[in-house]
Amino acid sequence: MWYNYGVIDMEFLELFDINEKPVGKKIVRGNTPLDGEYIMVVYIFIMNNEKKILLEQNVVTLAWVVPGGHVNSSSPKNNIVRECKEELGIDINPKKLKEIETIKKDFRLFKIYYLKEDININSVVTQKEEVKCAKYFSIDEINSMIENGRFRENNVILIESLKKYLHI
């Protein structure tokens, strides 16, 4: 069971099949789904005009992470739009999102989106319960954070996906 600030978090997560269709079941966060069932997590890379990526710093671990969250029964695009509003206080137009890929890892489906938009960092209002701050970083700076252990380990495969997408 995962803990949230010392209190058991009884968050229920939607389950999906390999084709990203809801299976009509939910699971308590922290539990492992049955074979053939997946938890879907959406992530977004927002790149500004300086070719820097917007990241957020986790309030508990202080690691830098790609903005995102778990998918409920609405579309993954709607979920990433909601996560951006909740965690960063920014409005994202779902029509501008480019889907990079979906990565299957263990019992998770990581759906990755890309948005080229120059969002003013001063307009970002973080969700204080989850996000300490947000900042733009170059790919080189992100690579350095990965090497120095300042980047969430399970987000490294997301960065590799972005590099492949951008051909860098």
Image (spheres, grey):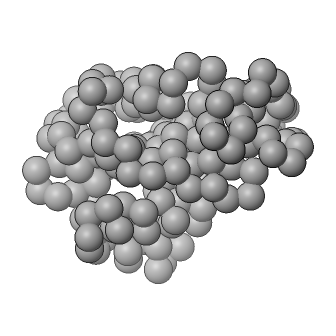
Q: Position of residue 1 (x, y in %)?
A: 87, 42
User: Which residue is at a point 24% across and 32% down the rendered structure image?
Assistant: 96
Depicted 50 relative to depicted 12: above or below:
below
User: Extreme front residue here?
Assistant: 19
Residue 103 % position (x, y): 56, 56
- Picture layout, residue 7 above or below residue 55: above
Which of the pair 161/24 is nearer the observer?
24
Residue farthest toward the bottom in the current orientation of the protein: 147
- For the question of whether residue 105 can be seen, the reply is yes
Which sits in the foreground, 98 or 135? 98
**Which residue is painted at 57% across and 49% down in the image?**
110
What is the quadrant of residue 71 in the picture? top right
Judged left or right of residue 131, residue 18 is right
- Is 110 situated left or right of 24 in this image? left
Q: Is residue 17 left or right of residue 103?
A: right
Q: Residue at x 26, y 70 (%)?
A: 167
Residue 90 seen in render? no
Task: Tell me: residue 93, above or below residue 101.
Answer: above
Toward the viewer: 164 or 54? 164
Q: Position of residue 52 (x, y in %)?
A: 22, 57
Whether 90 is drawn above or below 6: the answer is above
What residue do we see at 74% from left, 58% from top?
A: 106
Q: Position of residue 45 (x, y in %)?
A: 35, 48
Image quarter where the C terminus lies is: bottom left
